[in-house]
Image (tube, helix red, strand yellow):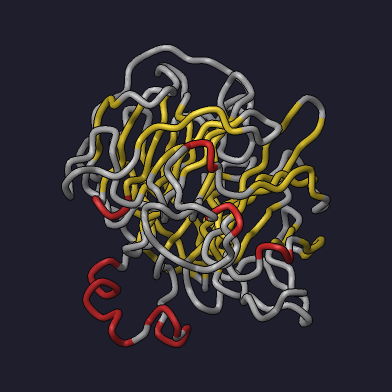
């Protein structure tokens, strides 16, 4: 593995940088293995080996995991986890914070109970902020301090013209392409941010840092599989500005099982294939990680060649999920994933994976070598 550079972008740790180059082509996957020695499970091979630490952070007894969704890391290495939460437990926090060793630090974000989904950390000047969004019973986005104080809280951008009347006042978990059900954020070099409405309108909205809506692009495709700047459940979004390429958007077009590349203003570039419900993206050094709900995490090299498939249990999960594997930890296998919903690199190049499972699970893939 080439040395990891601390100055490069990692998801949730945005730095204003630029790069030049072109988007590379998708290549065939490498074959990866799993091994277990002295109770340590290792996935990957060669330069891309990781120790698997399931259920890495632990909650105090007064809290419970309630379907983990996304994960983020701040400059100090603290880890932020958002879960969907149960709407009837309004006083239970939806966001938990752990130190770099996985020890509990604090909890906040009860306003996202019943729909917590996306979370990112952004540096603005000398201060870091949490950006969080919720779907289902929440249908809102917020900017928070790292301790949970609300900077602003916004509902559906009605000025976009893509939502049903009253959607900015609704908390009903209604689904449809005239509903606001946002899934995640990414940040632009000029200070604006993008919000992807992955479960609702399928549009990507552009805002300034104060949460003022500016424009949108994307939307639903005319026919399934059409892609090319239109989407079928665009769940994850990230700016790929790895060294040697023009900064561009990575869109995880989940229901099409593809990843689309777009320019920062929304023009189509290309489509990568070979995924099983890709959910999100992150970059670190030359690497890009894509968690797939179909039971694996894919790691790409600098030219988007697949260098590792980590925790692969695709055949069992896609063929036997009728057994209720998602809801039954007794059926989970060491070193294997169930439903990776999000993944991000920490400050040391390890990978944190949040899974869409009823009891919640955060796995740390500790980079070896």
Residue 217 screen position, x and y as percent? 39, 32
Left/right of residue 335 with respect to residue 16 in the rendered view: left
Residue 300 versus residue 320 in the image, above or below: above
* Residue 192 placement: quadrant: top right
Q: Residue at x 41, y 30 (%)?
A: 249
Q: Residue at x 60, y 75 (%)?
A: 66
Q: Is residue 73 visible?
A: no
Residue 37 screen position, x and y as percent? 46, 68
Q: Nearer the viewer, residue 103 or 125?
A: 125
Q: In the orientation shown, which residue stands out farthest toward the top?
A: 20
Residue 104 versus residue 229 in the image, above or below: below
Q: In the orientation shown, which residue stands out farthest toward the front?
A: 165
Q: Residue at x 43, y 12 (%)?
A: 20
Residue 136 versus residue 6 in the image, above or below: below
Quadrant containing the N terminus is top left
Q: How many marks?
A: 0
* Residue 53 placement: quadrant: bottom right
Left/right of residue 229 with respect to residue 120 in the rendered view: left
Left/right of residue 145 with respect to residue 329 in the rendered view: right
Q: Is residue 38 visible?
A: yes
Q: Residue at x 34, y 52 (%)?
A: 233
Residue 174 screen position, x and y as percent? 45, 66
Residue 254 screen position, x and y as percent? 32, 52
Q: Nearer the viewer, residue 229 or 70?
A: 229
Residue 240 versus residue 120 in the image, above or below: above
């Amino acid at each position: 593995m080439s040395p990891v550079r601390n100055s490069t972008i990692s998801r949730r740790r945005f730095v204003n940088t630029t790069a030049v180059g072109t988007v590379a082509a998708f290549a065939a996957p490498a074959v990866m293995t799993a091994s277990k020695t002295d109770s340590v499970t290792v996935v990957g091979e060669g330069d891309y080996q990781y120790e698997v630490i399931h259920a890495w952070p632990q909650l105090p007894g007064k809290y419970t995991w309630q379907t983990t969704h996304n994960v983020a890391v701040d400059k100090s290495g603290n880890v932020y986890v958002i879960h969907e939460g149960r709407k009837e437990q309004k006083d239970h926090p939806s966001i938990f914070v752990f130190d770099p060793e996985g020890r509990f630090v604090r909890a906040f974000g009860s306003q996202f109970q019943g729909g917590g989904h996306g979370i990112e950390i952004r540096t603005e000047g000398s201060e870091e902020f949490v950006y969080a969004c919720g779907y289902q019973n929440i249908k809102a986005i917020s900017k928070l301090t790292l301790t949970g104080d609300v900077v602003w809280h916004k509902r559906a951008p009605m000025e976009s013209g893509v939502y049903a009347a009253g959607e900015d006042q609704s908390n009903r978990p209604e689904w449809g392409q005239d509903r606001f059900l946002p899934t995640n954020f990414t940040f632009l070099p000029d200070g604006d941010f993008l919000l992807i409405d992955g479960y609702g309108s399928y549009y990507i909205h552009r805002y300034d840092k104060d949460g003022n809506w500016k424009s949108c692009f994307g939307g639903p495709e005319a026919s399934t599989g059409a892609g090319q700047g239109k989407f079928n459940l665009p769940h994850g979004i990230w700016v790929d500005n790895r060294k040697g390429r023009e900064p561009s958007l990575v869109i995880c077009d989940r229901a099409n099982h593809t990843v689309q590349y777009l320019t920062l203003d929304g023009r189509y570039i290309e489509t990568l294939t070979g995924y099983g419900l890709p959910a999100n993206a992150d970059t670190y050094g030359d690497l890009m990680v894509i968690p797939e709900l179909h039971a694996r995490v894919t790691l790409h090299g600098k030219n988007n060649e697949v260098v590792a498939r980590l925790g692969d249990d695709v055949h069992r999960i896609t063929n036997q999920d009728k057994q209720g594997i998602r809801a039954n930890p007794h059926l989970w296998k060491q070193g294997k994933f169930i439903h990776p919903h999000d993944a991000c690199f920490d400050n040391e190049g390890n990978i944190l994976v949040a899974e869409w499972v009823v009891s919640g699970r955060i796995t740390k893939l500790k980079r070896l070598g």
